[in-house]
Image (cartoon, rainbow, N blue to C red):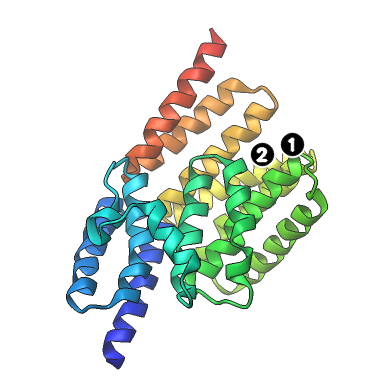
Amino acid sequence: MGDLESMAGNLHIYAGVAVWECGDRLTKAEEIMRIHAKRMIQYNHDNGLRNILPLLQLALKLMGSAEDAFMTFCGISEDDFFQQEWHRKGGKTSKLIGHTTRLYLAIMRGDMALAERIYEMGKMYHKGGILFIGSIMRAFLGGLVAFATARYHGDNEKEMIRVAEESISTIKIWAKHSYWNFANKLFLLEAEYWFLNGNEKLARRKFGDSIAAAAKHRFKNEEGLAAQRAAIFHLHYNRKQEASSYLKHAKDCYEQWGATGLVEQIDAAMSEILEGLD
């Protein structure tokens, strides 16, 4: 039983790294997670299945698939699964994974209003919790959400600025220990910091640094995200040609990653921008 528990724990760490972090082909990660989801059912390991399904579902959505992994493996919809999960006693790890996958998807799709709501909803599940790779993503994604929210001067602007600056401080420490893994994240958050504070020159430089670091370290997903955020920065200043160029860069990254769903979304955004250039 001990070995089985270790396997289930290592499995969701692998899945989180494969989908959130590495930028490896999503089709490969999806295939491996599907195999292990079947094994969790064979072993009657309910927690192991609950931990991996949100990540498999995320991969499918990024790939543009209409399949519902929860329906495939549990016979219930994604919404019903999460309703059960939020009300289930225990299962903190699966709650954290479920929350982080939804936050990640909202950000990758550029829906910061939804991301803010998901971030706020997830606070209760992150207090005092450690989720390995999920904790890293929470710090990074939370910073991105906080900067975007603060830029629109909402009711909780001061709190969001505090969260954003704390995120930079945390990832700056991590970058000292593992530059390869955290440099591009740090540069992207710093770019958002300077964007918020109206320093176009430094924001532009940091967006470029983030894209370059992610490319050098082969994080295609985060290279695409940095390019996408750079496009939003340029659109803010009505530089549509530059924004379109960065969206094309993001699209190329997402195509290499296998995120067809994001590619289709960027195609629509690029068409809208290009129409405005006519």
SS type, badge 1: helix
Q: Is residue 88 left or right of residue 157?
A: left
Q: Is residue 62 left or right of residue 34?
A: right
Residue toward you, 39 or 20? 39
- Give x and y (percent) for residue 198: 79, 38
**Residue 85 occupies quadrant:** bottom left
Mark 1 residue type? Glu
- Give x and y (percent) for residue 121: 61, 57
Q: Tell me, yes or no, whether the two marked residues, 1 and 2, touch with CB atoms within 8 Å.
A: yes
**Residue 128 occupies quadrant:** bottom right
Give the residue number, with chain letter if any, for mark 2: 204
Residue toward you, 168 or 126? 126
For image coordinates 61% across by 34% down, the residue present is: 232
Q: Which mark is residue 200?
A: 1
Q: For residue 73, say whether it is visible.
A: yes
Mark 2 residue type? Arg
Q: Residues within 10 Å of mark 1 (few under 14, many from 20)?
A: some
- Give x and y (percent) for residue 38: 19, 67
Q: Rounded to the nearest whole Å, what is the CA distance between mark 1 and mark 2? A: 6 Å
Residue toward you, 205 or 43? 43
Residue toward you, 132 or 216? 132
Q: Is residue 247 above or below residue 10?
A: above
